[in-house]
Image: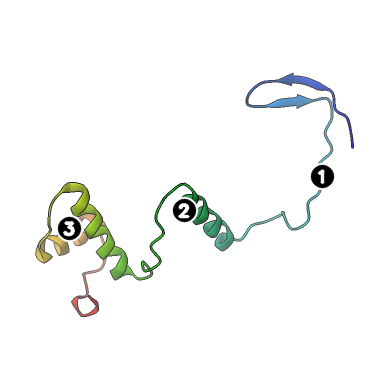
Amino acid sequence: MSTYKTIAESNNFIVLDKYAKIEQQGANHQTEAALEREFIQDLINQGYENPLNLNTQQAMLANVRVQLQTLNNVVFSDTEWSRFVEERLRCYKLNRQNE
């Protein structure tokens, strides 16, 4: 193990007189999917919910509707919700057959 001389140090960084990078196997790149899984796990560890049923656009829009209604203490009519989605979320029209 090498011994390094510290030139400067603070809470945010340290400056050494020399540094030799230690190569790590398999740590070169992380796939986007692995990054997303790690991010989701970090959020879960912080106490966020992970609703696994939000795997379609319709399911996500239904969840957004519930969350906005709860947060704002309002109830959207179907017409109001369709208009909100079209004007504010700029999504495709709600497909009533999939609800």
Which residue is located at x 81 percent, y 49 percent?
23
Give the secondary structure at mark 1. Answer: loop
Colour pattern: rainbow
Q: Is residue 83 left or right of residue 31?
A: left
Give the secondary structure at mark 2. Answer: helix
Q: Callout 2, which amino acid?
A: Ile
Residue 83 location in percent, x, y? 14, 61
Q: For mark 3, what is the residue?
A: 84
Q: Earlier in the sequence, mark 2 or mark 1?
A: 1
Quadrant in the picture for residue 26: bottom right
Give the CA separation, mark 1 to mark 3. 54 Å
Classify the position of the C terminus by image quarter: bottom left
Q: Earlier in the sequence, mark 1 or mark 3?
A: 1
Q: For mark 1, what is the residue?
A: 22
**Nearer the viewer's eye, disc 1 or disc 3?**
1
Q: How many neighbours does mark 3 have within 10 angstroms: few (below 14), some (14-19), or many (20 or more)?
A: some
**Nearer the viewer's eye, disc 2 or disc 3?**
2
Q: How many neighbours does mark 2 have within 10 angstroms: few (below 14), some (14-19), or many (20 or more)?
A: few
Q: Callout 1, which amino acid?
A: Ile
Give the CA separation, mark 2 to mark 1. 31 Å
Which residue is located at x 36 percent, y 66 percent?
54
Give the answer, above or below, for where 93 lies relative to 2: below
Residue 1 location in percent, x, y? 89, 37
Q: For mark 2, what is the residue?
A: 44
Q: Earlier in the sequence, mark 2 or mark 3?
A: 2
